[in-house]
Image (cartoon, coloured by chain):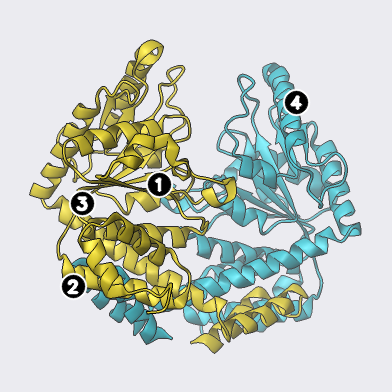
Chain colours: A yellow, B cyan
Amino acid sequence: MARGEIDVAALTAGVAAGDRRALARAITLVESGRADHRAQALDLLGRLRGAVPGRQALRLGLSGTPGVGKSTFIEAFGLMLTGQGKRVAVLAVDPSSARSGGSILGDKTRMERLSRDPQAFIRPSPSQAQMGGVARRTREAVALCEAAGFDLVLIETVGVGQSETVVSELCDLFLLLLAPAGGDELQGVKRGIMEMADLILVNKADGDLKPAALRTMADYAGALRLLRRRPQDPEGFPKALCVSARETSGLTAAWEEMQALALWRQENGHWTARRAAQARHWFEEEVRQGLLSALTRDPARTRMEELGQAVTQGALTPEAAAVDLLRSLT
Amino acid sequence: MARGEIDVAALTAGVAAGDRRALARAITLVESGRADHRAQALDLLGRLRGAVPGRQALRLGLSGTPGVGKSTFIEAFGLMLTGQGKRVAVLAVDPSSARSGGSILGDKTRMERLSRDPQAFIRPSPSQAQMGGVARRTREAVALCEAAGFDLVLIETVGVGQSETVVSELCDLFLLLLAPAGGDELQGVKRGIMEMADLILVNKADGDLKPAALRTMADYAGALRLLRRRPQDPEGFPKALCVSARETSGLTAAWEEMQALALWRQENGHWTARRAAQARHWFEEEVRQGLLSALTRDPARTRMEELGQAVTQGALTPEAAAVDLLRSLT
């Protein structure tokens, strides 16, 4: 086989065996924009479905703005889990990293111990800004981590615009990490984000900040009680808790809450229902994206450019030009 | 002709003559979801283009959250302009009105004098929540108002989510109306909205609130200076000003600023360039919406439902199902 060529069968075997280097190569493959790579990626995902049917991880979404201590939390939480014998994968969804020049995970040294842990796998965000692409890549990377036998896949986002929605459509449980607030304000967390959260974790509940963290937790607990009860929640959820990633306190309690919630949802059919609804969502999203991508290829692309010029010059109205183009496509 | 049937030629003549009842009927036509009405609407827009070529109004976008006194401002500003012999049309873009049960303009009594002014035309937001539909309807309503010889078309939005972006892609000048802020905070106005604004108007600069209004104006003037200078702005723009709709003060000064900015942009080619870019944007948006609407019609709709079921049941991956559907479409 020529150098650089991909042996999908070997890659399938490597991922299924839980080999981290194979997993890394597989993720690189699903991230590729090349058409031949795309075909191989679909082949790989199909083969893995056959090789390790039904393998599932707990998919944890984690959102938090810069400064809340997300890296420290992931490091401490991840190490706690690997210490219990669990295998933990961490993926980043950060559409802004391409522009801002580096996601939190771009710098693995911020999670130095976890990144050296053989039970862990950390994958930074790809330098690909388009949201549709990020969503697909992350979804497929999650599937690869599950096929590689990880017990837990943590999908983290810095929470810019759409990315929380993408993560919430990818995960089983959604965690919101916050820092203690200065006053009694709710840190401007948008209602939509609040409504996605299954667990709110107020980090930095240590030292001087402990009283503020407790107050912030109480504020959020109050705010959560005002939200309408969701059918997928047992009594008492969503919940707000305090943790200290630095002092590794509260992490065990948080993990127990996550497990209790996951178990309840599994036993009450919500787990399967959510995954089914998510799969359907991604199918429809793929179709929409695929359809729109026809506009970036010839002959549509050339015709669109010509008609766009005519519209710009005022020779055609936007509506008439659109009717013209759509007629040629369908 | 049967009752209720539309005579497009007569409607064209009525709109071109500036008849307000004809204009109202024409807007109802472009708002209709019926396929035969759609064809007639395109016919009407095409005929008007021929009948009154090149007729343009100043398109003013106006955004402001509830409570800033938008209705009072529109009433006072509109009456000032009609008093100068100008014809003023007011359109609302409010995607939330369908849900919340009535836009600001739904209650014309809040602009009682302006709505009775023969030089004015006020059109509330249609009860149609989908953003794509709202955008097209408003764009076409603007074109109809221009064809009807209005000098100024004011497009107002309550500023929820996407609607400011839609309005900014429809207007020549974008105004942001604010209330005096309590402290020195910038009222949580998003940077993206700030960057769209050509003029920030701090309303309620009267009575007790005057000092707060002046302070808020100064804060925004400072914030605007920190933004990067846009090529479409002369020295000193974007600007922040104080107005009092209640006392009708500052309105003349604000109108002079708008005229000065509009004139500068016309003389420097930015006016035409912006309208051309907007037309192109709407063409591309229409194509995208039109393409996606194929998914809501058979045979795609039925096939999508079948494949969606298979994905929900886990028989197919979202990716494989999408490939299958897209193959059948193209």
Mark 1 = which residue?
Answer: A164
Mark 3 = which residue?
Answer: A57
Q: Residue at x 62, y 19 (%)?
A: B183
Q: Farthest residue to the right: give it.
A: B267
Report the mark closest to the observer, 2 or 4. Answer: 2
Residue A235 place in picture, x, y as percent: 15, 34
| Dot 2 alpha-carbon crowd within 10 angstroms: few under 14, some 14 to 19, many 20 or more | few
| Dot 4 alpha-carbon crowd within 10 angstroms: few under 14, some 14 to 19, many 20 or more | some
Question: Real-space Cα distance between discs 2 and 1?
Answer: 28 Å
Mark 2 = which residue?
Answer: B315
Q: Residue at x 69, y 31 (%)?
A: B203
Residue toward you, A286 or A154: A154
Q: Amino acid at mark 4?
A: Ala
- Which element type, helix, strand or loop, lies under badge 2? loop
Label whose residue precedes the other's in the sequence (2 or 4): 4
Q: Is residue A233 left or right of residue A134?
A: left
